[in-house]
Amino acid sequence: MRFDDTFIEQVRSGISIVNLVGGYVRLQKKGKDYGALCPFHSEKTPSFTVSEAKQIFYCFGCGEGGDVFKFIMLMENLTFPESIHHLAESQGIPLPQSTKRDEAESEKRQRLLKILGIATQFFCQQLKGNKEALAYLKDRQITEETLHQFSIGYAPPGQHLLQELTRQGFDVQEVMACGLIKEGNSGQHYDNFRNRIMFPIHDLSRKTIAFGGRILGDGVPKYLNSPETALYSKSRNLYPLDLTRNEIRKRDFAIIVEGYTDCIIPFQFGVGNVVASLGTSLTENQVKVLGRYTRNVITNYDPDSAGTSATLRSINLFLEQGFRVNVLQLPTGEDPDTFLRKHGVEEYRERLKSSQSYLDFVLSEFMSNQRDPFSPKGKQEVISQILPYLVKIPNPIERAEYVTRIASRLQLDENLILLEMRKMPARRSTPRFNYSSPVERGTPAENTLLVAMLEEKWASQTFEQLEPELFEGLRTEKIFQCIFQLKEQGTEITTIRLRQLVSDDADRNLIEEMALRSADSPLSEEKIRNSVQELRRMKDERLIRQLQEEIKAEAKENSNSDKIAELMDQKVNLRRKMDKEQEEALTSSRRLP
């Protein structure tokens, strides 16, 4: 559904950004604004600021900023239209009339969600009457409370779900579009999930979008997952992020496991910051989704060859997205599910605390794969395998420490490892935030005037002193062009309107930063006047340089040209004007008390 500007503004104005952000992070009053630890990157000193007056947020550490829509998009991994819909629903704001096409698509989606919701209830009801399924879950020590929290159910043999859904008036094609039934060779349809313990997969709004099913007893496949549908993409969802995301954000790390019960049992034992990748190898999209909540992970895959391979693949994906990665390997034959049931939560937490760095893990793994890791050939193989991981460590001190440890383990000279590292291609990664590239600011005079234009108290008298030519060629030229455009339209200049009008992300970041800088640098008439005078001086300096270039060009053509004398007069007069203005400014400043 497309939303017009009027409706978007209605939703925005109906929400307090302080209340919205305060539902996710602990805000503390800081002057007229609020501060907190940034929810988008790990930090020890708060650099995240929220302005009630300007209805924006900005992090001076990582550079993320925006309005209520941007915040909810980042926190809940939503698109812009989804964020509008989400916030409108949360505030009880009626959605506008949509087009027939939008209505048809929305109705189709709602019917699919309704089918999956009914299927979830159906499986839960079937579980209550099946002694074998209940006995299996009881043997796994899954409590009734956990069954309810995760909506765990049972799919009976036969075509019972299909019969129930058609009885309720749903078309076979709709049910098939949900991935709940299949079509046989003879054209008959049958339930996709039969004689299986059912684990619903939810979106972040707790609506069922797919299922995973474990066979009860013998049979293949042991686990069966829903196919890709209009509602569900395996590569973009994590199980059960709808239940665990808040704990992940709170603890600032996530535990990555393989299976459904590897999530369910830890959650039941009070370890709530855990997710699984839904029976597929971890994907880049899943890593990006997780990055909305933390940049720190501990992988805890099964300690077998498949689990080791999955760990190595996931390490690379996490490092490419700028995560810090540790690895927890449980004893052979154990997974999080069995370990917690056998040894308890305290022992598992201790294992988490002592989890090893990904580099220690890959070094041990690569050394164990060599017949003789201390032979010249063995050392060469291990170094060639571990170098791609080593060069991804961004901190040079930490990297140097690992070089020393690797050299010690392999009984090798550190300089040889450093020499091999220099031969590696430049590190390419896509971390979420680029801390080496802070917001490019304008001159102090530009910044002061931008802050003034974003302050209701100072905007009018500041604008009266400005003219577009003052900003030509400067960092803030495009921003002030938008300011003049808003003024010409008779539109009030606000931080949100201005950031919507500019097209460059760097300009948006600068606007947000300057909008929240006013408390650090109070404005005054003198400060604004001096800034305008400074920009006038800079403009005149640009004109003088331009005249000088014209004089040089004319001299090459004709050294006796009358135009040279004319240009020289212009340059002298401009310099006199600048000197006079400077003297007047000094005199004026001396008169001030």
Image (cartoon, grey):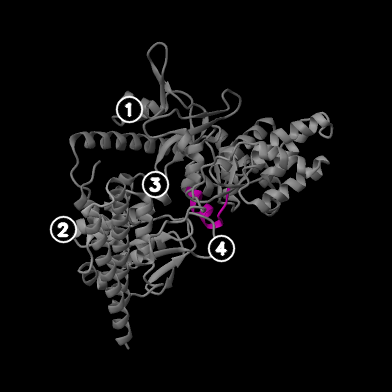
Instruction: Examine the rendered structure and indicate whether residue 575 appears above or below residue 587.
Output: above
Q: Which residue does the image show at 76% across and 40% down from the upper left? A: 416
| Residue drawn at point x = 55 percent, y = 55 percent | 252
Q: Quadrant of residue 467?
A: bottom left
Q: Which residue is mark 1?
A: 174
Residue that carries the numbered disc 3 in the rendered image: 205
Q: Quadrant of the C terminus?
A: bottom left
Crowd tier of the residue under label 1, counting other residues whose Cα lies within 10 Å: few below 14, some 14–19, many 20 or above:
some
Mark sitting earlier along the chain (4/2): 4
The answer to whether any part of residue 88 appears in the image is: no
**Magenta span covers which residues?**
243-254
The numbered disc on residue 488 is 2
x then y, percent, for residue 43 = 54, 60
Q: Tell me which label, 1 or 4, sits earlier in the chain.
A: 4
Residue located 35% across and 56% down the image: 475
Whether the magenta-drawn stretch holds residue 249 is answered as yes
Q: Residue furthest bottom?
A: 593
Sooner in the amino-acid sequence: mark 4 or mark 3: 4
Label 2 SS: helix
**Looking at the image, is 448 positioned above or below residue 236?**
below
- Please identify the dominant SS of the magenta region: helix
Residue 261 in the figure: left or right of residue 387: left
Residue 80 seen in this snapshot = yes
Instruction: Answer with mark 3 or mark 2, whichever residue precedes in sequence.
Output: 3
Disc on res. 44: 4
Decide if residue 340 is on the left or right side of residue 82: right
- Give the x, y percent position of residue 351: 70, 50
- Identify the amino acid type marked 2: Glu
